[in-house]
Amino acid sequence: MPTLGVNIDHIATIRQARRTVEPDPVAAAVLAELGGADGITVHLREDRRHIQDRDVRILRETVRSHLNLEMAATDEMLAIALDIKPDYVTLVPEKREEVTTEGGLDITLQIARIGEIVDKLQSANIPVSLFIDAAQAQIEASVKVQARFIELHTGQYAEAKDETNRQRELAILAKGCEQAIQAGLRVNAGHGLTYWNVYPVAALPGMEELNIGHTIISRAALVGIERAVREMKQAIRGSRELGMGNGH
Ligand SMILES: CC(=O)[C@@H](O)[C@H](O)COP(=O)(O)O
Ligand SMILES: NCC(=O)COP(=O)(O)O
């Protein structure tokens, strides 16, 4: 069964809507860990629309599980990561005007640049994961730049309009997962996963960690974060207790 990295960006989004001090993502991380989170994920966007530098610095001190820093492949972010030393870094694409991350990082277009950043981080003992679409060319490029992990972008699976498309997207993820593992990569996945669609992805052989945020924070707003995280752990195990664990 994969572990669960809880993405707490969406708590910071609420705080930034008022530019105030609450809700504090640091407090959310503590409660998420009490609910069973195996890791905490934050995306320090270049435009600082949610997570702030201060959050990452404090989380580095307070997170008891592991801290996954999602960031763009820029010099500014590289310097921050080398200074803060998260447990691992996930390199993600960023477009300033997007509502959320729209696709995977195209490693094939920037092999030298990504390779250089991966090397600098991993030389500093910070393992690197690359957030990519489950495409063979991206997997091969990820091997070439010697990243330790990939994170398969599950957005298209999550947004599939009907069962036929969902199954097609799941098959693409399954193939990508298998190819990556055979090539020696470790595989995580995330984006847009919910209580209703998580189980088929969680059940993919060799899947190590799922990074999930929006659905947990949405549920937490209604039932509280510890319970929301506990329920996601149950959904990953395939529990039907909530009537949510069967992939529908
Ligand atoms: C890369 C990724 O999938 C996460 O960072 C997720 O997108 C977080 O939410 P935002 O897109 O709102 O930053
Ligand atoms: N990398 C994906 C992630 O951290 C969470 O994405 P979402 O569940 O907030 O869509």
Image (tube, rainbow, N blue to C red):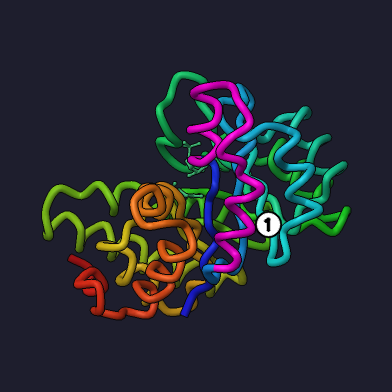
Q: Position of residue 239 (x, y in %)?
A: 30, 80
- Could you tell me which secondary element the residue under label 1 belongs to? loop
Query: Vertically, is 171 above or below 141?
Result: below
Residue, x 64% and y 36% (percent of image)?
A: 44
- Taking the image as drawn, is residue 186 in sight? no
Q: Decide which of 144, 28 is in the foreground and name it.
A: 28
Q: Is residue 82 above or below residue 62?
A: above
Q: Disc 1 designates what residue?
A: 147
Residue segment shown in magenta? 10-34
User: Looking at the image, how many numbered discs can be counted on the residues?
Assistant: 1
Indicate the position of residue 225 as horizontal and vertical percent values: 47, 57
Asked whether mark 1 lies closer than 8 Å to ligand 2, one says no
27 relative position to 220: left or right:
right
Residue 146 is one of the magenta-drawn residues: no
Q: Nearer the viewer, residue 124 or 13?
A: 13
**Residue located at (53% from left, 57% from top):** 6
Q: In the figure, is residue 95 to the left or right of 52? A: left
Dividing the picture into quadrants, the one containing residue 56 is: top right
Q: Is residue 28 magenta?
A: yes
The residue located at (79%, 56%) in the rendering is 126
157, above or below 247, in the image: above
Q: Amino acid at mark 1?
A: Ala
Question: Magenta-highlighted stretch: main secondary structure?
Answer: helix
For image coordinates 46% across by 50% down, the residue present is: 213
Provide residue 197's location: percent of width, then percent of height: 27, 62
- Find residue 65 and report its horizontal and vertical position in percent: 69, 66
